[in-house]
Image (cartoon, coloured by chain):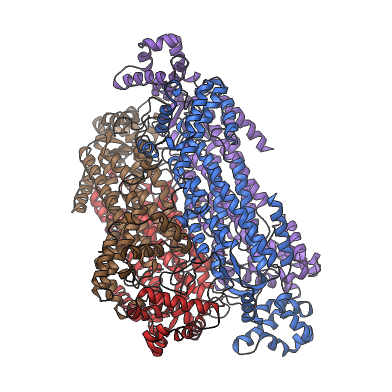
Chain colours: A red, B brown, C blue, D purple
C-alpha cells in the first residue's frame, strides 16, 4: 500500500502517489523488459521459453532489492544496469542472455516512465471526472441561487452560485480532455538502441518497435525520441493547466469561507480543520491543501520544460533530471485533484448567507443595471452620468441608490417608480446565467461519453 | 517599422515582436470594440451608422496616443477606460454612447489578447514550417552521411546526420501541430460583461457573443473564461514545448561546431559571428542566440501557469500579470524560431570532418556491433565478456579493437576474419536509420498538407 | 522622459524602468569604455588626449543610433562590436585605436550591467525605504488599533493593525538590507579579456582592473567572473525576496479592502480605481498592480538561476539571456515597490470597521483567551475541554460564548463573572503586540542610519 | 541509514537527504516541543518535572508512528495536532497538559524547519568546503598547465587549467560564504502564538521567545515571521546560487571529457560509468548527475519565492507548500554538492591532451596575441587589419598564421622573426593567470578560517 509519511496524507493523497513510487517504477521497468523479451521471441531473436522465464521472473516485484539497485545506480548513473543484472540472476543462466536484448538503458527508463505516467493518470482523470460531476450536481441545484459577483474582490454585480460552479466544471472538463488526449497520443513507446538506429536488431528494428508498442498498448512514435522531448513536455503542460484550474477552485472556496463572507463551508466530518490552539476554528483544510499543492506545480513544469534541450543522441544531465520531476508533478497534481474532489463532494452552501450578502451589498450592486435600464431612454452617456451622480450621493450620505434615483426627475421620467424598482432587483439582472449553465452541463454530459 | 532597440535584432527577430508590441495591442483592442459595435448594430442595440463610425474611427491606430492611454491606465489599472474615452472622442458626440456597449474591460483585453496571439502565431508557425522544411532538405541530402553518434557527449555508435536532422524535424512538426491546434481551438472570444452573465445584453447575450466570435473569426467558448484560464495556459504550454525543441536543435549545432568537433558551421554571410578581440573567431551566432531565447522560456511559462489561480469573477493581480508575460513569451519564441530557421537554412555540413571523426573515434565505436555479431554464435553473455576483454586490451595499449579481436581464437572461430572486418564497419551498423528518415519525411509531408 | 507604453504606467512605474531601458544600457556601456580609456592612459597604454577624446565622445548618448547598433548586433550576437565601431567613428581617426583596449565584449556588457543594476537599485531602495517609513507612521498611529487576526482567512484572535503593519515594515527593512548589501558587494567590475587572463594588458592586468573598479566605484572581484555567475544570482535572489514581501503587503491590502471586510481602502485621488461598466466600484488599483508585478518575479529569478551553468570561458547562450531577464526583473520589482509605496502612503484605515468586525466575530474569537485564563485553575486539558463544550453550544444555537461560560459552574468557580468578562475582552488579549511594534520601530530607525 | 530508493544513490547522495527525511522532521518538531517545555518551566508556566518528562519522551523518535501522524494530518492540514496528541500520550496524564504551551502549529513547524535546514546545511557546507579544497589542490598543481581557452565553445586564446579551476573554487567559496551567513542569521526561531502576539504567554512572551531561541541556538527575529517569508527565501536564494556554480563545474567537466576533447576524465573506480549496451563507454557519471540535480533547482527556488505572498496572520496554502519544496531543495543541492565533491576529488587531468589540443588549435589561437604585439608598432587599427589579412590567408589555404605573418613585410619590420615567434607562443600569452590563481588561493585560505 505504500508509505504515508509525516506530511503524507497532505501531499500523497489520491492514487497517483502510489503509482509513481519506487515500487511502481520498478514494476514498470520489469514490464518493459518482459514485453521486449516476448517481442524478441516472436521475431526469433530469443527462445519462447526464455521470454516466458523472463515474464515469470518479472511478475513479483518484491523479489528485487530496490535499495541495492539504487546503490548501484550511483555508480552508473542509471538503475537499469543493476536491474538487468538482478533480472538475469532471477531468470537463471540458461536464459539470462536474452534479457534486455538490443535496448539501451534509456529505452527501458523512458518506456517505463510512459507506463508510470499512464497508470498515474488513471486516478487523476477519475478524480477529475468526479470533481466535475460534483460541480454538475451543485450547478443544477444552485442554478437559481443568487449571490454577489465579485471582481477584484469587490462586490460588482449579482450572479448565481450555479454559474460560478459551472465555470469550475468547464475548467475541469476542458483540462481533462487535454490530459486524456495526452494519455492517448503522447505517451509513446521508446525503443532506439544506443543512438536511435535500432542497429542491434539488424533490419528488424521497425517491426520490433511496433510490436513492443502494441504489446504495451502504447502509441508508436515516428522516431525514437531520446533527445526530442515534446512528449514529456506535453504531459507537463497538461498537468500544469489542470492544476491551475484546481487552484482556482480551491482559492474561490477559501475566499467564500472567510468569516466575513461565510457563503461556503467545507464538510468532511468531525475533526476536520481543527486548530491546536483555537477551539472555535474550523479551517478549510481541503481548499488550503489543494492550494498548497498547486503552488508547487509551475516550478515543476518549468523544470521539465527546462530539461528539453538534450544533447545529441543522449543528454548529459537534463534527461536524468526528468524522472524525479515528472513523478513529483504527477504526485502533487494527483493529491491536488483528490483534495478538490473531496472539497466539492462535501461542500456546504449557505444560501441564506448568499442572500444576506446580496442585501448587505445593497442597491449599489445594481448601479450597472440601472445604467442598462436607462440607456434606451436617455442614451449611455447620460445614463452613466445620472447614475454616477446618484452613486456619489449614496457614498456621501445615508441615502440608498433607490432613494437617490427616485428623487431624480429624469430617472423617474425614464423608468417610472416600478422601473426603478425592477432595475434594482438582483434576481432580474442575471442575463443569460441560466442558459450558460445549461450549455456547460450539456458540454459536461458530452465529455462523459 | 517597429523599434529594434539595443539588443533588438537579438530578441526581436522574426515577425512576432511587432505583432505583440503596443501598437498591435492597441489595434487589437480597437478591432474588438469595432466588431462589438457592428454586432450590436445587427441586434438593434445600436444604429448601423454608429457601428460604421466606430469601425472607421478604429481604422487608423496612429490617431490614438499610446502614452496618454498608458498614463491613465496607471490610475485605473487597465488601459480600456482611457481607450474607450479616446475612441468616443474620435467617434464624436452623436455615436459616442455606442462604444463599448455591454462589455467589461476584461472582455476587451482578453479578446484582444487572443487576436494578438493569433497574429503573432502566424510568423511563428511559418518560420517553424520553414525550419522543418530546411531539416527535410538536409535529411534527404544526408540520408547516408555517417557520423559519430554521441551519448552523454561520448562517442557511442555510428549514426547518420540525416537521422539527427530528422529528429529535429519531427520535434518541429509535432510541436507545430500542437501549436496549430491551440490557435484553432483555444484562442476563443471573451464576452461576459461584469461578472460573466452578459446581463447588460438582456436576453441577447448568447447571440451577441456568438456573432462577435464569428465577426472576429475566433472560436466561441462554452462559458466566459474571465477567471478560468486554461486557454492562456494551453498557449503557454505549446510555446514552451516548441521552444524546448528549438533549444535542442540550437544546442546540437553549438556542440557540433566546437573547434574539436567541427562537423557543422553556421553560414549567414560575412561579418556573422565576428569577435571584438579575436580575429580568427567565427562564432555560432544563430545557435547561441536561439539558446539564449530558449533559456528565458520556462520561467515565462511558469509565470502564466502560476497566474491561473484567479479570484472569483475577476482576479486581483494574477490576470493583470498575463498580458506582459504572454507578449514576452510570444516575442521570445518568435525570435528563437526565426534564429533556428536562419540557422538551418544556412548550415554548412562538413561531411569529411564527420568521416574523419568516425575514423578518429576508431574501432572502439563498434564494440556493440561486435557483440551483436558474436551473439548468435556464442550467446550474449559470452559475447559481451569477449568484447569487454578486447576493449580492455585496447585501453591498456596500442592495439586496436580489430587487432585484439583477430588475435582471439573464439572471435575468429565465430566470425572469421571477414566477419570481424564487417562488424567493425560503421557504415554497416546503422540499423534502420534510413527507414526512420523516410518515415519522418513522410510524416513531414503529411503535416504540410 | 522615456516611453510609457500602453500598459506602461502599470509595469513601468518608478524610476527603475528608465534605468534599464536601451538608452541607459548604452550610456552604461559608453561609461565603461570611457573609464577603460582613462585607466589605460594612466598606465601609459594610451595618450591622455585619446582618453579625453573618448570620454568626451561618450558624454552624449543621443549621438549614437540605438537601432543601427541593434541591427548589427543581430550579425554578431553582441551590441559591443557595433558600439565600438560607432565610438571609434565619433572619436575620429587619430584616437580610434585606443577605444576598447584589451577588453572583450563581455567585459563591457557585464560591467555595464552592474552599472545599470546599481542605478536601477537607487529608486528601488529609495521607494522601499519610503514604503517602510509609511509603515512606521501607520504602526505608530495604530499601535493600539485592535482588529481581527485571521489565520487561513478565518477569524482567529485579536491583534492590532499596528502589529500587522510592523510585520510589513520588518519584511521591507530586512530585504532592503540584503539588497543594499548586494549593491555594495556583489556588483563588481568585470575585466578579463578574451579568456579571463587579461593577457592583452601584459603584466599590467591586475593594476588596470583595480583602477577600472575604482574609476567606476564598483568592487573588484577576486577573479574575472565571465562564467561564474553568483553575482547576478545574488541580485536576482535579493530582488525576489523583496518582491515576495511586497506581494504579501499588497495581498493583505486586497483582502482587507474586500467589500465584506472593508477595513482598508486605497487612497490616491479621484478617478483611481474606476470601472468601465460599474459606476459604484472603486477598485484597489495599487494593490492589484503590485500583485500583478509580483506574479512575474519568481519565473524571472528562475530564469537567471537557470542561466548560471555557463560553459568554459564564455557561455554559448546562457550568458546572452541574462541582460534581458535582469532588466525585466529590475523593471518589474521597481514598478512593484513604487506601487506599494503609493499604496502605503495613501492608505485609508477604517478603525471603526475594524472594531465592528471584532464585534461581529463575537466572543468566539476569544476562545483561546478563555482557555489561557482557565488553565492555571483547571489545567490545560480540562480548560480546553470546557471551552470546547462551550463553543459547541454556541455553534448549536443562539447562545454566546459568554453566556455559555457563565452558565458553567466550573468556569464561574475558576474565573468568577468578572474573570469571564475579562477573558472575553479583545483589548486585554493582545500579548506583547505593543512591545513587538516598538522593537520593530527601533530596528527600522537603526536601519535608516 | 535511511532509504536509498530506486533512483536513490543518484538524488539522495550526501548527508542532506537523511537530514530532511520524515524522521528528521519529526525529531526536529519534538526538539522544539521539548525546548518549549523547558523554557516554560524556567518561567514557572510548567513544573520542572513536566519539562523533564517531555524532554525524555521526545528523545526516542522511533516511539512515534509517522504514518499515523501523517494520516491524521490529512484531517487537520498539519501534523502538529497529531504529534501533540501522541506526545501527550507518551508523557502521561500528569504532565500532558504542559505539552505545546502557548504555541500555534506554525510555531512548531517553522522552528522545526529551521532546525532541519541548519542540520541539512552541515553536510552541504562540509562537502562544498571539500570540493573547494579539491579545486585548490588542482589549481596549485596546474598553475602552469596551459590549455585552450574556449569562448562560445570555440578555441579563443590560451589559458591555464589552474585558472579554470580557480574560477570554480571562487564560485564555491563565495556561495559558501553566503550560505554560511544564511545559516547564522536567517534561520530564526518562530514563536508567535495564534496571530503573532504571543498572547497566551501574557506579558512573558518576549522573554520566552528569547529563551527558546537560545535553547535551540537559533537567532531571535525582530517579530514573529509567520507570513513574512524572507527567511526561507534567503535560504532558497543561497542554495540556488550555490547550485548554479555546481552546475557550471559539472558542465565544464562534461565538455572537457568529450571524446574529441579528452582533457579530463572522471575517476571513481571500476564500474563507474559503464553502459548497458556499449562496452567501450566510460560515462561521466558524477558530472552528469550533478547536472541533473542542478536542472531541478531553479523551479524549486521559484516555488519558494512564489509562496512568499502569505495571507494576513497565517496563509491558506502558500505556507503549507513550503516544507516539501524546502526539503526537496536541500536534498537536491545536497546530492549535487556531494557529486561535485566526488568529481573533483577524483578528477583525472590529461595534461598531454591539453597540450595536444593547443597544438591542434594551431597558431590561429594566437591571433589576438599578434595584434597585441603589433599594436605598439603600428597602432591597433592597422594591427587588426594586418592580422585579419593573415587569418584570411590561413582560412583560404594551407598556410599557417606564422608563415602568413613572416611573409608580410610590415609584420616582420615591426616584430622581427623572433618577435613573431614569441607572439605565437601560447605559454607567453597568459597575462596574469598565475597572479589571479594566487589571489584566489589566498581568498580560499582566508575563507577556511
Q: Residue at x 58, y 46 (%)?
A: C122
Labels in figure, total: 0
Is D387 on the left or on the right of A284, as rendered? left
x then y, percent, for residue A4: 53, 66
- Which of the 4 image quadrants contains residue D200? bottom right
Which sits in the foreground, C211 or A273? C211
Q: Is residue D426 above or below residue B79?
A: above
Residue at 37%, 65% in the rendered image: B84
Q: Is residue B357 above or below residue C426?
A: above
Residue B446 placement (x, y as % from top left): 19, 53
Residue D87 left/right relative to A171: right
Q: Where does residue D330 sit, x and y in percent of width and height? A: 56, 52
Query: Would residue A105 be found to the left or right of residue B134 on screen?
Result: right
Q: Pick the residue in front: A338 or C274.
A: C274
Picture quarter containing residue D172? top right
Q: Is residue B150 visible?
A: no
Q: Is residue C375 visible?
A: yes
Position above or below: C56 against A111: above
- Position of residue A157 measured from the top left corner of the image (x, y, whole percent): 43, 77
Point out the image quarter for the C terminus of chain D: top right
Amino acid at each position: 500500500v505504500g508509505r504515508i509519511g509525516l506530511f503524507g496524507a497532505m501531499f500523497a493523497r489520491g492514487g497517483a502517489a502510489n503509482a509513481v513510487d519506487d515500487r511502481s517504477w520498478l514494476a514498470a521497468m520489469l514490464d518493459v523488459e518482459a514485453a521486449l523479451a516476448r517481442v524478441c521471441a516472436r521475431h526469433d531473436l530469443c527462445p519462447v521459453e526464455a521470454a516466458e522465464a523472463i515474464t515469470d521472473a518479472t511478475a513479483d516485484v518484491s523479489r528485487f532489492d530496490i535499495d541495492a539497485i539504487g546503490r548501484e545506480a550511483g555508480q552508473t548513473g542509471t538503475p537499469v544496469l543493476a536491474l538487468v543484472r538482478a533480472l538475469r540472476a532471477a531468470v537463471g543462466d540458461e536464459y539470462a542472455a536474452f534479457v534486455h536484448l538490443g535496448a539501451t538503458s534509456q529505452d527501458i527508463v523512458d518506456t517505463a516512465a510512459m507506463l508510470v505516467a499512464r497508470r498515474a493518470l488513471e486516478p487523476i482523470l477519475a478524480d477529475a471526472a468526479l470533481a466535475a460531476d460534483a460541480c454538475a450536481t451543485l450547478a443544477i441545484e444552485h442554478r437559481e441561487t443568487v449571490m454577489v459577483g465579485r471582481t477584484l474582490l469587490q462586490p460588482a454585480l449579482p450572479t448565481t452560485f450555479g454559474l460560478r460552479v459551472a465555470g469550475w466544471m468547464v475548467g475541469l472538463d476542458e483540462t481533462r480532455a487535454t490530459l486524456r488526449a495526452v494519455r492517448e497520443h503522447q505517451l509513446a513507446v521508446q525503443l532506439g538502441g544506443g543512438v536511435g538506429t535500432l542497429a542491434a536488431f539488424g533490419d528488424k528494428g521497425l517491426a520490433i518497435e511496433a510490436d513492443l508498442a502494441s504489446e504495451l498498448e502504447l502509441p508508436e512514435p515516428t522516431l525514437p525520441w531520446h533527445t526530442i522531448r515534446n512528449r514529456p513536455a506535453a504531459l507537463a503542460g497538461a498537468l500544469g493547466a489542470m492544476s491551475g484550474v484546481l487552484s482556482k477552485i480551491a482559492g474561490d472556496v477559501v475566499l467564500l469561507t472567510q468569516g466575513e463572507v461565510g457563503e461556503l463551508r467545507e464538510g468532511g466530518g468531525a475533526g476536520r480543520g481543527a486548530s491546536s490552539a483555537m477551539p472555535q476554528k474550523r479551517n478549510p483544510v481541503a481548499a488550503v491543501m489543494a492550494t498548497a499543492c498547486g503552488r508547487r506545480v509551475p516550478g515543476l513544469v518549468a523544470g521539465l520544460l527546462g530539461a528539453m534541450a538534450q544533447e545529441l543522441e543522449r543528454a548529459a544531465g537534463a534527461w536524468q533530471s526528468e524522472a524525479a520531476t515528472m513523478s513529483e508533478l504527477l504526485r502533487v497534481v494527483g493529491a491536488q485533484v483528490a483534495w478538490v474532489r473531496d472539497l466539492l463532494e462535501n461542500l456546504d452552501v449557505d444560501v441564506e448567507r448568499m442572500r444576506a450578502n446580496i442585501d448587505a451589498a445593497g442597491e449599489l450592486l445594481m448601479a450597472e443595471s440601472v445604467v442598462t435600464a436607462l440607456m434606451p431612454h436617455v442614451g449611455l452617456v447620460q445614463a452613466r452620468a445620472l447614475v454616477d451622480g446618484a452613486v456619489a450621493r449614496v457614498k456621501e450620505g445615508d441615502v440608498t441608490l433607490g432613494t437617490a434615483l427616485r428623487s431624480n426627475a429624469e430617472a423617474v421620467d425614464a423608468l417610472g417608480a416600478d422601473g426603478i424598482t425592477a432595475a434594482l432587483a438582483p434576481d432580474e439582472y442575471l442575463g443569460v446565467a441560466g442558459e450558460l449553465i445549461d450549455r456547460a452541463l450539456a458540454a459536461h454530459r458530452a465529455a462523459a461519453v
